[in-house]
Amino acid sequence: MIKQWQAVDDYIAGRLIARPEQQHETLDANRRSGLPAIDVSAPQGKLLHILSRALRARRILEIGTLGGFSTIWLARALEPGGKVVTVEFDPRHAEVARANIAREGLTDRVDLRVGAALDILPKIEAEGAGPFDLSFIDADKANNAAYFNWALKMSRPGALIIVDNVVRDGAVADPSTKEDSALGARTLFDAVADESRVTATAIQTVGSKGWDGFLIAMVK
Ligand code: SAH
Ligand code: DHB
Ligand code: MG
């Protein structure tokens, strides 16, 4: 199936996503630097972009930058004067991201922080960088519930919190799974289910990144 899913993603991108929007240079640079090809797909990146624009986002929080592919989609959606604050643990990834963001002319719209998100999120809060209009959580999956709680703490009413990779080939609903990412997703679902300050759903996706999904929570 993945071949057909890939073909349909290519079709969607070919019809609806302009060539310069697709960031071929970013993906090439990531490949040359040996980064894992685990960025969101182009149709998914555009979804994040459209949601950010619909919210007229000025402040966006991202956890897990990698080479900046999703960061660039988000930064291009900002209202004038807006900022994406993005957190990346691996200095090698951050260096590649910084160059990609600069090539796109977005350096002044991206605040890239290098370190473990659980160390950096309290600093972001203390600086008053929020409240955020949209948060995109896409880092180490075991900490998803903790990241969700930080994002919630720094969100404005009406904000969206979007979490990537919450389905993992269906493992999230497989009681026998031992996969860390699926267990992390389940802990996240439990936290969101118990949180009365948000209303939420999750959407399964297939495409060039296989079978996975996004959780989308709206802050009341
Ligand atoms: N959002 C990116 C993909 C992120 S991949 C995109 O779609 O283009 C996940 C990233 O999270 C990796 O670069 C990894 O180094 C980073 N990461 C892992 N653990 C982390 C942590 N504790 N804090 C911050 N980033 C982390
Ligand atoms: C992995 C991480 C991701 O963020 C993703 O979108 C796909 C895979 C991973 O760590 O395997
Ligand atoms: Mg991901």
Image (cartoon, rainbow, N blue to C red):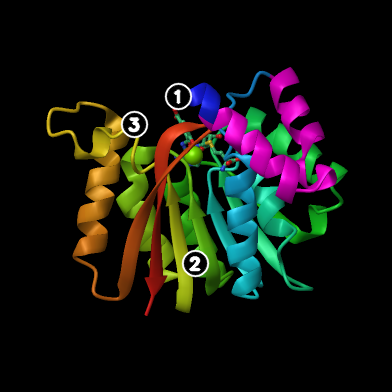
Ligand 2 contact, mark 3 (Cβ < 8 Å)? no
Dot 3 alpha-carbon crowd within 10 angstroms: few under 14, some 14 to 19, many 20 or more = some
Residue 102, x across and y down, in percent: 84, 45
Residue 95 lies in quadrant? top right
Amino acid type, mark 2 = Glu
Q: Which residues are magenta?
A: 5-33
Quarter of the picture containing the N terminus is top left
Q: Are marks 2 and 1 in contact (CB under 8 Å)?
A: no
Quarter of the picture containing the C terminus is bottom left
For marks 1 and 3 on the same chain, the one whose residue lies earlier in the sequence: 1
Distance between the Cα atoms at labels 2 and 3?
Answer: 34 Å
Dot 1 alpha-carbon crowd within 10 angstroms: few under 14, some 14 to 19, many 20 or more = few
Residue 77, x across and y down, in percent: 71, 63
Q: Is residue 138 visible?
A: yes
- Residue identifier under label 3: 169
- 159 sits left or right of 50 in the view: left
x 77%, y 26%: residue: 28
For marks 2 and 1 on the same chain, the one whose residue lies earlier in the sequence: 1
Ligand 2 contact, mark 1 (Cβ < 8 Å)? no
Q: Is residue 208 visible?
A: no
Dot 2 alpha-carbon crowd within 10 angstroms: few under 14, some 14 to 19, many 20 or more = some
Q: Secondary structure at mark 3?
A: loop
- Residue identifier under label 2: 125
Residue 156, x across and y down, in percent: 48, 78
Asked if residue 26 is positioned above or below residue 28 in the image, the reply reads below
